[in-house]
Amino acid sequence: MTVFVTGAAGFIGYHMCEALLARGDSVIGIDNLNDYYDVALKKARLARLQQHGEFKFVLADICDGDALNRAVGKARDVRAVLHLAAQAGVRYSLINPSAYVNTNIVGQLNILEMCRRLPNLAHAVYASSSSVYGGSSVLPFTESDSVNSPVSLYAASKKADELMGHVYAHLYGIPMTGLRFFTVYGPWGRPDMAAYIFARAIFSGEPIKIFNNGDMRRDFTYVDDVVRGVLAVLDAPPSSAGGSAPHRLYNMGNNRSEPLLRYVELLEKAIGRRAEKELAPMQPGDVKETYADIEAIRRDHGFEPKTSIDEGIPRFIAWYREYHGV
């Protein structure tokens, strides 16, 4: 089938395109290659995808509804949409809030409108985030928890995405699924994420900042597990049985909450150097702990994460060494 993937040159988007192409799907990938982080990394991912004959790349911004319509205008056989493009990052939302409204809300609306006009669309899957749970102290986070108290604009924009997805599923019968990703890491990862930031600093002999004085935990999810989970969800659109809208939300995490300092220890071990740690207070918009209850996605889609940070961190560092030549 033909799958339309937004954020195709991004971290998860790249891995999803690779997996879709490997199983024989055709992929139309769209990305604006913005400079939120190193564009060279995005282009390197894209160059690998463009070696596939069934991959078509469109340079465009999801905030441009006309560009989206042109991108799919000649591909009426699109059966699935995987919407991963977003303005990511919690701390950057304090610096450039308009980017989150434009990309995550206006962009989401444009994708939904595009979906409404695709005659053969069977399922649209979009990225949400564990950030929607805010500073909840009730662990693990489950999909039935209230998410009405976001602590960052990024989280608020993702909550808005979920509400908009439900509306379009209800009004137009579009099967839609939102995935709340929990701290995804791995090869080809984002330079603004902890694994990359810490690795770069340790290799360079520079100090790393440990926020909340190290008293933080995260549900770190390896990208290969995410890929398997997303494929399973994509292939099983929700129904409107019982009169409900064909819209579902799922956590996608590793189902383990790991201490941040243990994460750093594993990075040090894989790199072979000790990190110089600089303790710092909690940052505005950040949360102390995340922990995914994955019972719903396990029940409905057989999702079962297989990769612990003990395995995943060395794999990430092996890629980092190769990519950066260190």
Image (spheres, rainbow, N blue to C red):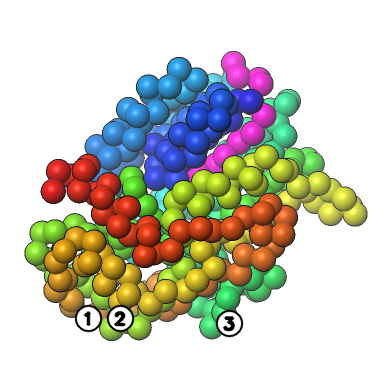
Q: Which mark is residue 279?
A: 1
Q: Residue at x 32, y 27 (%)?
A: 47
Label 1 packing within 10 angstroms: few (<14), some (14-19), many (20+): some
**Position of 283 compared to 172: left or right?**
left
Label 3 packing within 10 angstroms: few (<14), some (14-19), many (20+): few
User: Which secondary structure, mark 1?
Assistant: strand
Percent of width and height locating residue 153: 46, 63
Percent of width and height locating residue 218: 43, 71
Answer whether residue 85 is magenta in the image.
no
Could you tell me if the residues under marks 1 and 2 are in contact, i.e. CB atoms within 8 Å? yes
User: Which secondary structure, mark 3?
Assistant: loop
Q: CA distance from mark 3 to mark 1?
A: 26 Å
Whether residue 94 is visible to the viewer of this picture, yes or no, is no
Name the amino acid type tagged 3: Val
**Position of 250 compared to 312: left or right?**
right
Which comes sooner in the sequence, label 1 or label 2? 2
Task: Answer with the quarter of the image where residue 108 lies.
Answer: top right
Task: Tell me the magenta residue range.
Answer: 74-84
Q: Residue at x 59, y 42 (%)?
A: 231
Percent of width and height locating residue 94: 35, 64
Residue, disc 2: 214
Residue, disc 3: 138
Name the amino acid type tagged 1: Leu
Label 2 packing within 10 angstroms: few (<14), some (14-19), many (20+): some
Q: CA distance from mark 2 to mark 3?
A: 20 Å
Q: Residue at x 72, y 34 (%)?
A: 122
Whether residue 119 is visible to the viewer of this picture, yes or no, is yes
Q: Residue at x 78, y 40 (%)?
A: 172
Name the amino acid type tagged 2: Gly
Which comes sooner in the sequence, label 3 or label 1? 3
User: Which secondary structure, mark 2?
Assistant: helix
